[in-house]
Amino acid sequence: MRLGARGYRVTVLERRDQPGGRAYVYRQDGFTFDGGPTVITAPFLFEELWELCGRRLADDVDLRPVSPFYRIRFHDGQVFDYTGDAEAMTEQISRLAPGDLDGYQRLMDTSRRIFEVGFERLSYEPFSTWLDMARIVPDMVRLQSYRTVWGLVSKHIQDERLRQVLSFHPLLVGGNPFQTTSIYALICWLERKWGVWFPMGGTGELVKGLVRLIEGQGNTVRLSTEVSRIEVEQGRATGVTLADGTFLPADVVVSNADSAFTYKHLLPPEHRKRWTDAKVDRARYSMSLFVWYFGTDRKYDDVAHHSILLGPRYKGLLDDIFERKVLADDFSLYLHRPTATDPSLAPTPGHDTFYVLSPVPHLDAEVDWEQQREHYRRKIEAFLGRTVLPGLAEHVVSSHVLDPLGFRDELLSVKGAAFGMEPVLLQSAYFRPHNRSEEIDRLYLVGAGTHPGAGVPGVLSSAKVLERVVPEAASLVREERAGHAA
C-alpha cells in the first residue's frame, strides 16, 4: 500500500487461499477463528494506511478497546488485571505487591524513555550500515539496552509474581524475557499510550480492509500463488518465478516471507555472500507455538478477552523452550476469547469462540508432533477444564490445531519458529536481515523477520522503513531509460 501510494504498480502474491498470511481466518462449524495476531496496539499505524488512500479506518473497521488488556492468572488461582489505567494498576499492585508501587512507577518512567527512543525514533529508521548502528550506541548505553527485559524489571520490582506480570511482553514477539534486550520493555508504555484493541468481526476484517485499499489503488492481490524463486541478473532482482513455472518480471521485489526462508529457499546460494545456508542455520530462532482453536456450546462469561495463565515455573519453563529445547510437562498459556467483545464470532448466542496458545520449542527439539499433537491438546484441555473453563471437554463442538509442523509447512517458517529470528541484541537492528537486502540490488524485506521485528506494530513499521530505502518509482523509470539509451 505504501509503495502503491508512491506510484508503484504492485502485485501481491499470497501462497494461501486467503489474504493475510499469519492473519489467516479459519471458519468451521459456524465459528470464526482468527489464526494469528489478535492483540492490536498502536492503531494509528493502520489509520496512516487508510489516510494514504484518502479514507478513514473507522469507515471500514470498527475497533473496540479491550479492558483489561490481559487477565493474568497465577498458578495458585490468584488473578491480576493488567490495564492501561494508572489508577487501576496502582490498585492491582497494592493488592499483589504493595512494596513495589514506587518501583512500578520507576519502571514505567524507564519504559517511556525507551519507547521515545526505540519506537518513536528508531522503529522507522533503516539500519543498513555500521554507521546507522553506531549513531544509536550512546542511546542504547544510556537506556541500559545491554540488560535483558527480566533484568530491567527486576532492577525495579522485588515481588516475583509482579516481575512475571511486567516481563512477559517479549513473548508476544517471540523473545525470551531472560534473553531479549530491554529495548522491548517499551511495549509496556506502547500499550499504556495507545491501548489494546480488537476489530469487530475479527482480525480478518482488518485484512479485508487492507485488500480493498490495495485494489482501490489499482493494484492486485493474487491468492493461491506460490513463489518458488527470486530471479537475479547481474546482481539485481528482476522478478519471481512461480511454482507453476510462470515468470513475473518486476523492477522491485519485496519479500514479506520469513526472512530466513527468503534467503535459504527463494534466493539461489550463488547470489548470497552474507546470508549463506550455514549462517541462516546458525541463527537463533524464536520459540514455536502450539495453538488450539476451539468452539464451545456454552458460554464462559467470566473469562476475559485476553487471559494469560501462568504455570508453576517461569524461568525454568522458558529455559526448556528456548535453551534446552524440550517439551515440558507444564506450560503457560495465552487464552483468547474474542466473543467476550464480539459474540458474532460464534454461531449462536449460547456459544463461545476461543484459541489457546502454548509456547513450545521450535523444530530443533526432538518432538514427534504427529505423535504428540492430540496428547498435548488433551493436556491443555484438561488443564483449562480444571481451572478457567470448567467442564470444557464436554462442551467442545469445533476444534482445529496448528503446531510447529504447521508453522514450517503451511507458513514456511524455518525450523517452525513462529516469529522468525529471536530478538536478542545481536539479532536486532543492524544485526537483523536488512530491509534493503545486503545481497541483491532491488530486493527488499518487510515483516517480522527484518527490522524492527515481530508484532503488529513492528510489522507495520517495517513497511514504513521501505519508504526510506526503496527508490522513487519515477527514478527507476529514468534509470531504465538511461540504460536502454546506453
Image: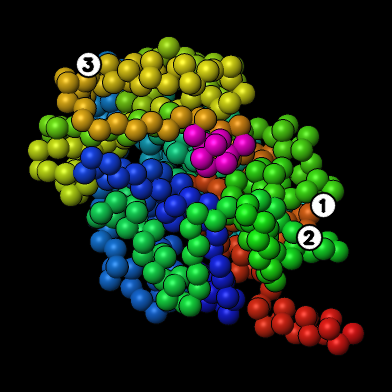
Identify the residue shown where x is 44% and y is 56%.
Answer: 19
Q: Secondary structure at mark 2?
A: strand
**Residue 314 found in image quarter:** top left
| Residue 143 falls left or right of residue 480 | left
- Please provide percent x and percent y for residue 333: 36, 27
Residue 116: in sight, yes or no? no
Q: Earlier in the sequence, mark 2 or mark 3?
A: 2
Gap in angstroms between the C-alphas marked 2 and 3: 56 Å
Query: Which residue, as the protein is rendered here, is positioned at the far left?
Result: 350
- Please provide percent x and percent y for residue 234: 86, 64
- Please provide percent x and percent y for residue 175: 53, 35
> Disc number at residue 271?
1
| Residue 238 falls left or right of residue 82 | right
| Residue position marked by numbered label 3 in the rendering | 386
Whether residue 410 is situated above or below residue 241 in the rendered picture:
above
Q: Amino acid at mark 3?
A: Arg
Q: Amino acid at mark 2?
A: Val
Q: Secondary structure at mark 3?
A: helix
Residue 247: in sight, yes or no? yes
Identify the residue shown where x is 43% and y is 12%.
Answer: 329
Quadrant where the C terminus sits is: bottom right
| Residue position marked by numbered label 2 in the rendering | 232
Q: Secondary structure at mark 1?
A: helix
Query: Which residue, as the protein is rendered here, is positioned at the far top?
Result: 329
Gap in angstroms between the C-alphas marked 1 and 3: 54 Å
Mark in front: 2 vs 3: 2
Query: Which residue, as the protein is rendered here, is positioned at the far bottom?
Result: 485
Magenta stretch contains residue 407: yes
**Residue 74 found in image quarter:** top left
Q: Give the residues drawn in magenta, as a range.
A: 406-414
- Please provide percent x and percent y for residue 213: 41, 71
Residue sitting nearer the eye, 172 or 163: 172
